[in-house]
Image: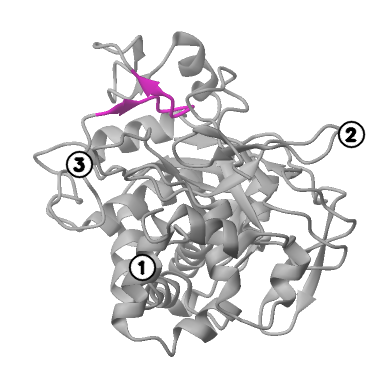
Amino acid sequence: MYCNTSTPSSAPATLLRVTEIEGKGRSFVASAPLRAGEIILRDSPLLLYSAYPFFPTSEPPHVWSKNLYCSNCFRLITSLPPPSSCSFCSDAFCSSGCQSIAGSTSHTPWICQSLRRLRDGSSSPLLAQSYVRQVISRFLLAAYNLAVVSPSNFRILLSLQGSPSSISEDDANFLHSLITSLSPTPAPEFGFSRELTAALMARDGVNGFGLMEPFHPEKERSVRAYGIYPRASLFNHDCLPNACRFDYVDADSNPYTNTDVVIRVLHDVTEGREVCLSYFPVNLKYSERQRRLRDDYGFTCHCDRCNVESNWKDEEEEVEVMSGNGSGMSEGEEAMDGEGMDEEEMEDEDDVDFPHAYFFIRFMCNRDNCGGTLAPLPPSSSSPESTLMECNVCGNVSKVED
């Protein structure tokens, strides 16, 4: 668990501005021309919490992992026993330094006592509860702890978008009762109530980002932790995005920055154009994308790609997914489809199927079991666009093929 006690900047990066777009709400648009690979935003989480349930569950989406992560910075712990741990609640840490940092932020006495109670295999109210309830309880612990250690950041959390009406009444009642049972009652200055609990759950539901486990070519990846990133949450979704998110949880040795997210643009973006991310792997089928957007975010996507694919048959969708995995086109077809076209021409092309082919050829990682998005390495002030592309999932760096 992690709680940010420093006050994040209230203004977005100078390369972006926030505007209202009809049907989308608050959105990021380019306030200047953006270069391919350019870093347009770095954001730190208001809070982080483990994606692991307290007790094993067979239901999706969780894949029970044997990996162990630091309870503060969420880096992978490779040694057993862990380098440091809490003697009262058993939380593991990658170092005594990380445990010390957590002691004044995310691992306060209230959190420690609460974790010990919720982990009690004989009396925990979370025994036999669903994966969703177990993990949301972790979020609520982190959120109500944030109200104590950083009231200003708790107010930022409450300012994010989210509709309590989208929250299950049964879940809200159960989880509020659970938090109420933990002594002392949290956040009295914010009017601790069932309504506040439901409002927090709504913010988590549509503003959370997942930090994934390390990539492995032969294993299914699971989420190691979820975080609330206040500025990055303003990016809207597009099924053919012009930017993507990177994180370097295990590569960055600084526990204050290793959970930051970095947003880079995939190709040149003109001033005034909206900058969008994809909320999930780009190579998902139309039906799966629509289901996830509807179930997880409460909207139906009408982007250009979805408008085209909504008229496709199932067999055509399967071919599209194969193309996204790097197995649906020959080298000759790749050269023909991409020859002589820059991004502006790609967007203006009359053949609306064309951007799909171009995107999958140029910006999709073709490593097995990856499904990541490729972005050019950040350009220097004087150099042209980098010919090296980095994958935001497996981390592989490859050269752009002519």
Q: Secondary structure at mark 1?
A: helix
Give the vertical position of 110 relative to 332 (above or below).
Answer: above
Q: Which residue is mark 3?
A: 64
Q: Is residue 277 visible?
A: no
Residue nearest the viewer, comparing 34 with 187: 34
Q: Which residue is mark 2?
A: 381
Q: Quadrant of the N terminus?
A: top left
Q: Separation of disc 2 and disc 3 at Cα?
A: 45 Å
Q: Residues within 10 Å of mark 2 (few under 14, many from 20)?
A: few
Q: Earlier in the sequence, mark 1 or mark 2?
A: 1
In the rendered structure, which amino acid carries the disc numbered 1? Ala
Tell me what residue is drawn at x 70 percent, y 69 percent: 346
- The mark that comes first in sequence, 2 or 3, is 3
Q: Main secondary structure of the magenta part?
A: loop
Residues rendered magenta in the picture: 67-77
Q: Secondary structure at mark 3?
A: loop
Residue type (three-letter) at the residue carrying disc 3: Trp
Q: Which mark is residue 172?
A: 1
